[in-house]
Image (spheres, grey):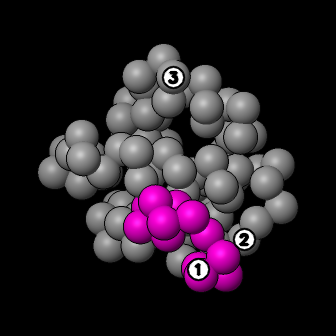
Amino acid sequence: MLLALGTTAAKGQKLFAKKLKRACGANGGVIAGKHTQDEWTAIENAGKLKAEIKKICPKVKDRALKARYMKDYYDFFHDFASDSGNVPSC
């Protein structure tokens, strides 16, 4: 499934597995499935993605939420949202 993703979604999946999975205590599908694609888009457009990740995963360290990771996280969450029909491998 990873190869079928866009480049940033694949990068976001790898980043999630490396930087967020342990702190979130759940796999990427569970976290991405917390919202629909439209909801993830609204969160991103409002500039609240970092806050939403911290809300869902309160144990996440700030160093895992660097600005340069946010676009990749967003693409991953959007591609695996509850209404996407996609299931990540992490």
Q: Residue at x 61, y 69 (%)?
A: 5
Q: Looking at the rendering, which quadrant does residue 1 occupy?
A: bottom right
Find the magenta span and give its range.
Answer: 1-13
Inter-mark Cα distance, 2 to 3? 24 Å
Helix, strand or loop status at disc 2: loop
Quadrant showing the C terminus: bottom right
Say if 37 sits above or below 45 in the image: below
Mark 2 residue crowding within 10 angstroms, few (<14) / some (14–19) / many (20+) = some
Prevalent SS, magenta region: helix
Q: Earlier in the sequence, mark 2 or mark 1?
A: 1
Q: Is residue 25 above or below residue 34?
A: below
**Amino acid at dot 1:** Leu
Q: CA distance from mark 2 to mark 1?
A: 10 Å
Q: Would you name the residue on which mark 3 appears?
A: 45
Picture disc at residue 87: 2
- The percent coordinates of residue 7 (x first, y second) are 48, 66
How would you rate the neighbour count of disc 1 (Cα within 10 Å): few for under 14, some for 14-19, many for 20 or more? Answer: some
Whether residue 53 sits left or right of residue 42 in the image: it is left
